[in-house]
Image (cartoon, helix red, strand yellow):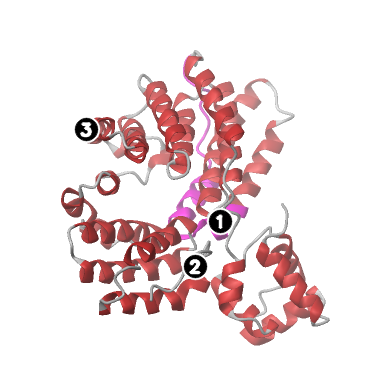
Amino acid sequence: MSPSSLGRLIAQQRRLRGYSQARLAELLCAAAGSPTVTRHEVSRWERGERLPGVQWLGWLAHVLGLSPTRLGLAAGPDLRRVSTAEVTDLCLLAGSWLRQDPGGDPQAAAPDPGIGALRRMDDLVGGADLAPLAARHRRQALAALRPARGTGRRLLLAPAVELSQLAGWTAADAGQPRAALGAYREGLVLAMEAGDRQLGAHLLGSASHLLGEQEPGSAWQLARVAAAGARAHGSAGLRALLAQRAAYAAARCGDRRAAHGCLLVAQRLGERLVPEREPPWLYWLDQAELAAMTGRCLVVLDRPLRALPLLSRPELRGSRQPRSVAVYSGWLARALLGVGELEEACAVGAGGVIASVRSGSVRAAEQTRELAARLAPRQDVRAVRELSDLISYVTSYLPGARGLRRLV
C-alpha cells in the first residue's frame, strides 16, 4: 500500500524535528499517558497501512506542533474513483456468474466464529479501524486456499468468499473504493468456483451499493444481475436486500418507475423475512433496516413526506451502532429539509454529526458533508449557524473529512 497523505505528513514532520519513529512513539505515549503506541505502529501510520484513531490524531497534533485541522484533512482516505475498466470488468464477470450453472448446493462448511466476530465488530467499529484487520484475515484465508485441493479446498472456499465480502465492505467504509471493488471481484470468482449462489449475489449487491453514487448505471446493472441470480437460490431476506439495492440504484439513475417497482418487490419479500432461515451473514437485516432503506430511497426520489415515518422509527434512533445512527440521521435530516422543517433537520443532523465522529466510518462522515452542503445557503438561520460551528469543531476528527467547510 502506498503511503497516505497523513503518513507522508507524519514522516515529513518527524524528520524535520529530528525524531526517530521510536522517539515519536515515546513522546506520544508520554503526552497521552498511555504506553500503547510503539515504533511499529508509527511505521504503519507512515506507510498508510493504518490510520491513527481520533485520540491519536490529537496527540500527534500536539507533539508535532500541527493544527488538528491539517492532520484531519490529511487523514482523509484515498477516495479516488474506481476506473471504468474495473467497473466494466466486474459487470462482465457478473454476466458470466449469472450464466453459470451453480451445479447444486455448495459444500457445507462449519460456521467460522472468527468471521462472525469480525462482522459484529463491524457493527461498532468503523472501516477506518476495521478494514486492515478484515484485509489481513482475507489474505490469510486466500493463503490457506492456494495449496488446498479436493474436499479440503471446497470447505475453505465459503470462508474465503465471505471474508472477501467483509473485506470489501470495510474497505468501502474506510473510503477505499478500489480496494473494495477488487475484493468483491475476487470473492465473486471464488463464489463461482464454490457454486455458492447466495454469497455471489451478496457480493454483487455490495458492489452495487459501493457504486451507487459514482456509477449508478453500473450499480443498477449489478443489482439486477444479483437479483436474477438469487431468484431460485436466495433466501427471502437476501432477495429483499437485493431489491433494495436495485431500487436505490434505479433512483440514482432517475428511473422512478423502476425504483418504485423494486421497492414494492422488496416490501413483499421483506414480509416473508424469517431471521432463523437467513444466512448467518445477514443477521443484521430486519424490518427496521428494510424500512430505513426504503426511506432513504424515497428521499432520493423526492418523496420526503413518505420517507419520514420510515426514517423516524424508534429502533433506528435508539440503535447502539454509531454508523447506523449517523447514516440514517443524515437521511432523516434530508427528509425534514424536504418538508421545510429546517430547525428540526439541524437538531437531527447534530446528533448524526456526533455519531459520525464516534463511528470511524467514511460512509457516515459523508452524511455530514452532504448535510453541510444542503444547509450552506441558509446562513441566516440560527440553527444552521450552530450546526455549522459543531461541524467546524469536529471536521478534523471525521474520517474522509476532505471537503468539509464551514457553512457560514
Q: Which residue is mark 2?
A: 398
Of the residues tagged 1 and 2, which is closer to the observer? 2
Q: Amino acid at mark 2?
A: Leu
Label 2 CA crowd tier, 10 Å (few <14, some 14–19, many 20+) = many
Marks 1 and 3, how far apart in space? 35 Å
Left or right, residue 178 beside residue 222: right
Q: Is residue 177 above or below residue 55?
A: above
Residue at horizontal 60%, vertical 25%? 154
Q: Is residue 393 visible?
A: yes
Of labels 2 and 3, earlier in sequence is 3
Marks 1 and 2, how far apart in space? 15 Å
Residue 285 in the image: x percent, y percent? 33, 43
Q: Which residue is mark 3?
A: 264
Q: Is residue 116 magenta?
A: yes
Residue 135 in the image: x percent, y percent? 62, 48
What residue range appears in magenta? 104-132
